[in-house]
Image (cartoon, grey):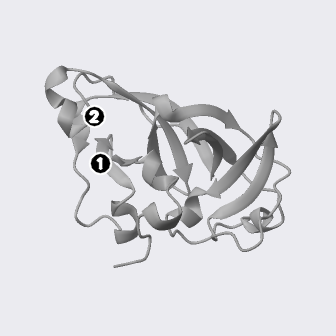
Amino acid sequence: MQHANSNGAAGAAKDGAKDTGAVQEFVTVFVGETMFGLAINRVHDVFIPTGITPVPLAPPEIVGLLNLRGRVVTAICLRRRLGMSAAAGAAGQATGQATGMAIGLEQGGETFGLVVDGVGEVLKLGAETHEAVPINLDARWRDLALGVHRLDGRLLVILDVDGLLAFGSDRPSTKAA
């Protein structure tokens, strides 16, 4: 498991909350060497995905379905969702044996497992490290990012959980512009 350095800064991580003095908490996840942040209030579980059943004709980012404590969970590959190239050893996802970890998320009464390469620590971050989504961020990521934090030489891309889980007509485009 990889870990990020915590920056115990005061302030807020979102532009609209900069004046409140609030600190936001993010669960850090990794896809390759890239570090992403998910708002901690959206994360329900962290687990190892096993026994994934592929779903015919599903979008490529949907790895399949799995059983999590008696609930049917849709497993989504964050790497594919962000249009990133396949990792070495990622062939297991095609056979129902996902590698890495998964983050349990809920939206609209449905449960999702976001499959990632690794899970880091929880970071408490404030406004002084927060920046808007950079214009040079990959076009496939811009609609799925809420902003970034610069941390000790690393960039933490804060992901929009609602955008990640939006499929169908309300889904943001992930095609390269």
- Write the residue at 74% across / 65% down: 89
- Write the residue at 77% across / 54% down: 65
For the N terminus, which image quadrant?
top right
- Residue 175 in the figure: left or right of residue 100: left
What x and y, as percent, mark residue 120? 55, 37
For disc 2, the marked residue is 13
Secondary structure of the residue carrying tag 2 is: loop
Quarter of the view holding residue 5 = top left
- Residue 77 in the figure: left or right of residue 71: left
- Residue 31 in the figure: left or right of residue 134: right
What x and y, as percent, mark residue 31? 55, 55
The correct choice, above or below, for 57 with respect to 77 in the image is below
For disc 1, the marked residue is 147
What x and y, as percent, mark residue 134? 24, 58
- Write the residue at 68% across / 45% down: 101
- Residue 62 visible in the shown view: yes
Quarter of the view holding residue 61 = bottom right
Cα distance between the residues tagged 1 and 2: 8 Å
What x and y, as percent, mark residue 99? 74, 54
Q: Are marks 1 and 2 in contact (CB under 8 Å)?
A: yes
Mark 1 or mark 2: which comes first in sequence?
A: 2
Amino acid beneath label 1: Gly
For the C terminus, which image quadrant?
bottom left
Q: How many marks?
A: 2
- Residue 135 in the figure: left or right of residue 120: left
Quarter of the view holding residue 108 = top right
